[in-house]
Image: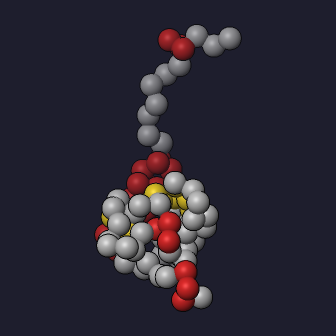
Amino acid sequence: MPDYNDIPKPEPKEIDEKNALALRHLIEDAILRGRPNGDERCDNCLYYLNPDAEFEYCWHQKIRILVGGDWWCQWWESIESQ
């Protein structure tokens, strides 16, 4: 059984810095908000993989990340527009 006092503090690795930089670029390119835009929100968007989930994968080619159901981005698209 590990002693939790022996576990070192997490330190960012090179891959973490790379990922943070990539996400910063994504944020600069996208208008991604943690709140809906009127009736438009991720969980009623075509690209939200499972509309019943509180958090889900967005498969839009410019985002492709985990998002919240109440979030919104500029690429929101109605499910009916399929």
Q: Position of residue 22 (x, y in %)?
A: 43, 62
Observer-nearest of 81 and 1? 81
Observer-nearest of 39 and 60? 39
Query: Is residue 8 something that shows in the picture?
Result: yes
Q: Position of residue 66 (x, y in %)?
A: 52, 58
Considering every residue shown, the one lying at the far front of the view is 39
Residue at point 32% right, 71% down?
37
> In the shown orientation, is residue 9 left or right of residue 2?
left
> In the shown orientation, is residue 39 left or right of residue 77?
left
Q: Quadrant of residue 52?
A: bottom right
Considering every residue shown, the one lying at the far right of the view is 1
Relative to 11, say whether 13 is above or below.
Answer: below
Relative to 23, say whether 80 is above or below.
Answer: below
Q: Position of residue 80 (x, y in %)?
A: 55, 85
Question: In the picture, which quadrant includes the C terminus?
Answer: bottom right
Residue at point 52% right, 55% down?
55
